[in-house]
Image (cartoon, rainbow, N blue to C red):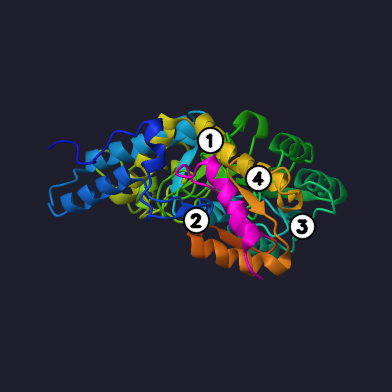
Amino acid sequence: MPDPFPSPPPLQWAQRSAAFALPPGVMYLDGAAKSPRLRHTLDAAHTLLEAEVDPRWLPYASFLRHLEATRTLAANLLFEADVDGLAMVPSAAHGVATAARNLPLQRGEHVLVLDGQFPSNLLAWQQRCSEVGAQLAVVKPREGESITVAVLRTLADTPRVTIAALPHCHWHDGQLLDLDAIAAAVHDRHAALVLDLSQSLGVLPVQLTHWQPDFIVSVGYKWLLGISGLAWLWASPRWRCEGVPLEQHWGARDPGPDWVYPMDAAPPYLPGARRFDAGGVADPLRLAMTCGGLAQLEAWGLERVAAALGEVTNALDAALEARGLSAWKTAGHAPHLTGLRVPADRLDAVAAAFAERGIMCSRKPACLRLAPCLAVEAGQMEEVVEVAVKARL
C-alpha cells in the first residue's frame, strides 16, 4: 500500500492571507489562544479520517516512520536539529510536571515564577513546593520596571533559588523576557531553568546553546499551527539519560524486533528524550495536523513570520501614537503579541465593540490581548484603534 498519510504541499507566502479557515468578516487577533486551522491541512485531516475506514489503512511501520519524521521536522525547525532531545507529550502541563518530578528540590529552597504566570507552568511547582517544603519566589515588577529587570532583581534578592520556571514572553500582553541575560543569571546561581515557550515557539527562535535549559515545553496548537493534544518536551542531555517519565508507556520502550516485554525486566527506553513520549499522543490525526503546521512554518520561514506579525503590532502602536494614545501601548512586547491597555473603565465597552465588529481577541485583567494571525494585515490596525476609541461606555 502507498504511504497512508496525506501530505499536501505547503502554501506559498503570497497565499498566507487566505490560508486560514476563518468565517467571513472575522479579524483574528487571538492567535495566543489557538491558531485558526490551515485550510489545506484541514482538508488532509478529512481525507485521513475517511481512510481510517479501511482496517488495512495504517501499517505499523508507516506509523513509526511518520512519527519520527514529525519529530525530526520539529527538531530541525525549532530545536537546532536536536532530534534526540524531543519527546511528544499531551500538553505543556504534562511537560512541566515531568520537569517538576525530575529536578531536585528541597525544603527551604525556592522556585522562581512570574506573578500571573500561566497555570500550566505554575500549578506543578506549587504542588512540588507543597510536597517538599519549598516556596515560590514570585517576580512582581515595580512601577516602570521591565519583567527582565524584575526577574534579575528577584534572583539576586532571594536565597536558594533552585529552579527558575519562565516563559519567553508574558501570556497576558507579550512583554518580552531577555532570556540570554536571565539564563546567565540562573546558571550563575547553579539553578535549573525550565521554559514554557507555548506563547513564542514558532515565532521567536530558541537559543539552546545560550540558554542551556534543563527542560523546554510548548503546546502545538498556537504558533506552531497544529492541534491540541500533541505538545513538545525538550530535555537536556542529562535528563534524557537520567529522567523518569510520568508514565511508563510501551511506546517509549524498545522491545526489539519481536516486540517482547519480558516479565523480569522492562525493555530499555528508546534513545534520547523519547523516554518521555506519552501514551495516546501520537495518533495519526494529531501527527498529520502537527506535521502539516510545521511544514507550513518551514516553508514560510520563522523570521519572515515574525517580521510580518511584527508589522501588524507595530502598525497598532503607530496608530495609537497618532491619536495621542501611547499609554494604551504595551512597552517591550513581542512581535506577535501585545496588550491594548485601554483604561479599566473602558475594558468592557471596548471588548463588546470588538466582538460586535468581529475582532477576535482575549480580555485579560489589565488589557485586551491582541495576537494577530497571518491573515491579518497591518492596514487593519487603524480600524482596530477606531473601534476602540469609539466604543461607548
Quadrant in the picture for residue 16: top left
Quadrant in the picture for residue 152: top right
Disc 3 residue type (three-letter): Val
Instruction: Determine if the magenta segment contains residue 380.
Output: yes
The residue sitting at 51% across, 64% down in the picture is 355
Helix or strand or loop: what does disc 4 sit on? helix
Residue under numbered circle 1: 308
Nearer the N terminus, badge 2 or badge 3?
3
Disc 2 residue type (three-letter): Leu
Which tag is nearer the camera, tag 4 or tag 1?
4
Quadrant in the picture for residue 322: top right
The residue sitting at 66% across, 54% down in the picture is 340
Q: In the rendered image of this protein, does residue 250 appear above or below residue 2?
A: below
Nearer the N terminus, badge 3 or badge 4?
3
Looking at the image, do the residues carrying marks 2 and 1 touch, with CB atoms under 8 Å apart?
no
For residue 319, which numbered disc appears in the image?
A: 4
Considering depth in this image, is 26 or 31 the residue closer to the camera? 26
Nearer the N terminus, badge 1 or badge 3?
3
Dot 1, how many residues are within 10 Å of its Cα: few (below 14), some (14-19), or many (20+)?
Answer: many
For residue 138, which numbered disc appears in the image?
A: 3
Quadrant of the rendering where the C terminus is positioned: bottom right
Nearer the N terminus, badge 2 or badge 1?
2
Disc 1 residue type (three-letter): Ala
Nearer the N terminus, badge 4 or badge 1?
1
For residue 246, which numbered disc appears in the image?
A: 2
The magenta segment is 367-393
Considering depth in this image, is 262 or 1 the residue closer to the camera? 1
Quadrant of the rendering where the N terminus is positioned: top left
User: Can residue 212 be seen from the camera position used here?
Assistant: yes
The residue sitting at 55% across, 35% down in the picture is 306
Disc 4 residue type (three-letter): Ala
